[in-house]
Amino acid sequence: MSQHPSPVFILGSGRSGTTITASLLNHLPGIQIAKETGYIAQNMALLQDVNNPEALVRLIKEVNSWLDKEQWRNRCSIEGFREFSQRYQLCGGAAFIHYVWQLDSRVPWHELSFIGDNTPLYVMAIPAIQELMPNARFIHVVRDPRDVVCSVLKMRFGADDVVVAAMEWHLLLGCWLMAERVVAAERRMEFRYEDLCISPEQTMTRLAKFLNLTDEDATT
């Protein structure tokens, strides 16, 4: 097992099945998918400047506001980040992202093969994420837009109009199609949410292979 786990992002449009995918992957050995974080795309400048003490203070404040929103058990701190970085000899924005992910991990960071989260809208920031984390892998979950729109309209957040909800789905799918041009084939995977529902074992086997696991791992 690699000493440093590789980052993996589960993304797509909202209400497409990213959360259930993350939950299922967390049952596989060596995989830890955290709750949504949400801060990465909006704070790229701070992540790139994380070695600047002032930028780190601002970043900690921004991140903890997201962790509060998503009801994480733990919060990040300057001392915690520095301890994590020193322990594993890491630095920079990628190290900070890993530090946040491991806050609620059920398995020690160094014992994992893959770690990441399932913030759907990171699909809009794949090129920037790839620049920060060149070894990142991306799993795109795509769901029938009719089901996505119906689900979105029932939520208290998001679009409250059929046309707007459909346009959002189309925009986010377009972001993935554009990202496919810059992400190597071996570091990206797409599957349909409907396939996960209809053929769960087959779909989980595909996911397991993408994350370097065996067919047996996927079905146990």
Image (tube, grey):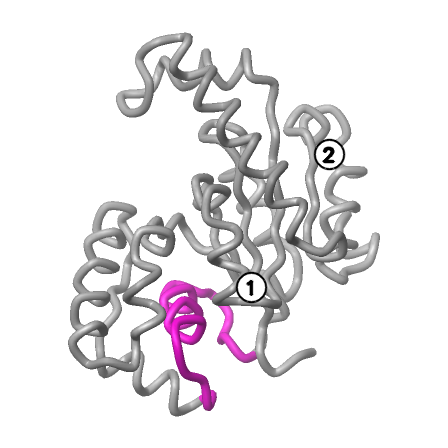
Measured as percent of width and height from the top left, residue 178 is found at 60, 40
The secondary element bearing badge 2 is classed as helix
Count residues near mark 2 (Cα–Cα under 10 Å), then give few for <14, some for 14-19, many for 20+.
Answer: some
Would you identify the image quadrant in which residue 105 lies?
A: bottom left
- Whether residue 89 sits left or right of residue 37 in the image: it is right
Please state the extent of the stretch shown in magenta in the rendering.
88-110
Q: Look at mark 2 in the image and give the residue it sits on.
A: 200
Q: How many marks?
A: 2
193 and 139: which is toward the camera? 139
Would you identify the image quadrant in which residue 84 lies?
A: bottom left
The secondary element bearing badge 1 is classed as strand
Q: Residue furthest top?
A: 162
Count residues near mark 1 (Cα–Cα under 10 Å), then give few for <14, some for 14-19, many for 20+.
Answer: many
The magenta stretch spans residue 106:
yes
Label at residue 130: none
| x 45%, y 55%: residue | 34
